[in-house]
Amino acid sequence: MTKVAIITGSSRGIGKAIALELAAEGYTIVLNGRSEERLADTLEIIQKTQPNSISICCDVSILEGANLLISKTIETFGRLDILVNNVGISMRGHVAELNPEVFKTVFESNVLGTVYPTIPAIDHIRKTQGSIVFISSLAGIRGLPGLSAYCSSKMALRAIAESIRIEEKKNNIHVGLIFVGITDIEHNKETIAADGSKRVLASRKDKKVQSTESVAKAVYKNIRRRKFITVLTGIGRLNAFMQPRMPLIVERLILKNIHKFEEASK
Ligand SMILES: NC(=O)c1ccc[n+]([C@@H]2O[C@H](COP(=O)([O-])OP(=O)(O)OC[C@H]3O[C@@H](n4cnc5c(N)ncnc54)[C@H](OP(=O)(O)O)[C@@H]3O)[C@@H](O)[C@H]2O)c1
């Protein structure tokens, strides 16, 4: 029986690239997303490499959806080797202007949408001594202007990952935490505006961004080497080094470049 990997939010974007990478490495894939149509398109591509792969249409930020994802995977394959918690949504807006619902929506997606599938998955991953991977962001290293809910939700992933890593040491579960930099996005990717409404993000084609494929390769490398933390991009590694050692200098640099943050958050 080939090894089985679930990637939450894998009908497009970074999740889809991770699914393709793991399929190429021999894993049977369980795709996940909320749109049947997008899932069907992606499954067709994945099945060219891994014909037994399936998709499970459910919302992982809802307990029943997350439970279904894990139980249906076990029912179908009888094992689970990797869970990549990739689902996440960003937001825009300064705290003073935020509809408080923005925090609720972002935490439901990014934190509960990670914890809900992880809890029922742990027992199965203990049996395979596999991996649980959390897709964080460079925005999870320090609070950034206009991104308070997103930054704090991604910081929460670090605490969750650290707890599981210690709790499951004796069971030999690998826990990976990936700090992803600004990455190419698919057409119509949404963010949440300050008033709580959904807003389509502008294309990043003209900006210096990572490809989804390069992120996926880094995720697989993290899994293969059973590393804890992987920080992507040079600026990300510099930030991760400086933030704990000289946070006030980092703050001053951000203030000096505030226009770039405003521009990047468009
Ligand atoms: N793109 C970047 O620049 C960047 C940078 C750093 C970190 N990240 C992180 O990388 C991850 C993926 O980002 P992305 O840009 O690839 O996002 P994306 O293009 O918006 O894709 C999100 C995927 O998740 C699915 N999804 C969303 N909410 C879901 C839910 N509640 N339950 C099940 N599936 C759900 C979406 O499909 P449906 O809408 O059909 O459900 C889609 O397949 C996120 O955690 C993000 O924070 C991204």
Image (cartoon, grey):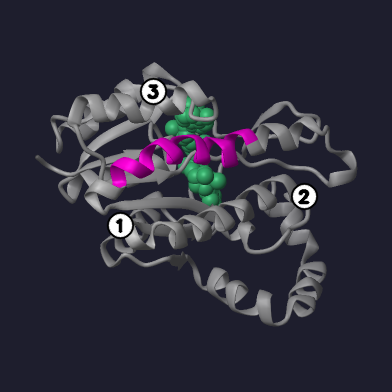
Please say if 246 is above or below 169: below
Query: Which residue shows up at 32% across the image and 38% down it?
Result: 6
Displayed quadrant of residue 193: top right
Which residue type does callout 2 highlight?
A: Gly
The N terminus - image quarter: top left
Main secondary structure type of the part rendered in magenta: helix
Badge 3 is on which residue?
68
**Label 3 residue SS:** helix
Report the magenta residues as a range.
108-125
Q: CA distance from mark 2 to mark 3?
A: 35 Å
Query: Depth-wise, is mark 1 or mark 2 nearer the camera?
Result: 1
| Residue at position x 33%, y 56% in the image | 173
Dot 2: what SS?
A: loop
Please say whether residue 54 is one of the residues in the magenta stretch: no
Nearer the observer: mark 2 or 3; the answer is 3
Q: Foreground residue, 13 or 98?
A: 98
Asked whether the beta carbons under mark 1 and mark 2 sit within 8 Å of each other, the answer is no
Residue 205 in view (yes/no): no
Q: Which residue is mark 2?
A: 146
Q: Residue at x 81, y 30 (%)?
A: 195
Whichever of callouts 2 and 3 sits on the residue coming sooner in the sequence is 3
Q: Residues within 10 Å of mark 3 (few under 14, many from 20)?
A: some
Instruction: Estimate the x, y position of residue 144 in percent, counting from the top left.
Output: 73, 58
Residue occupied by mark 1: 220
Callouts 3 and 1 close, C-beta under 8 Å: no
Q: Is residue 217 above or below residue 80?
A: below
* Residue kind at label 3, given as amino acid type: Leu
Quarter of the image for residue 110 reads: top right
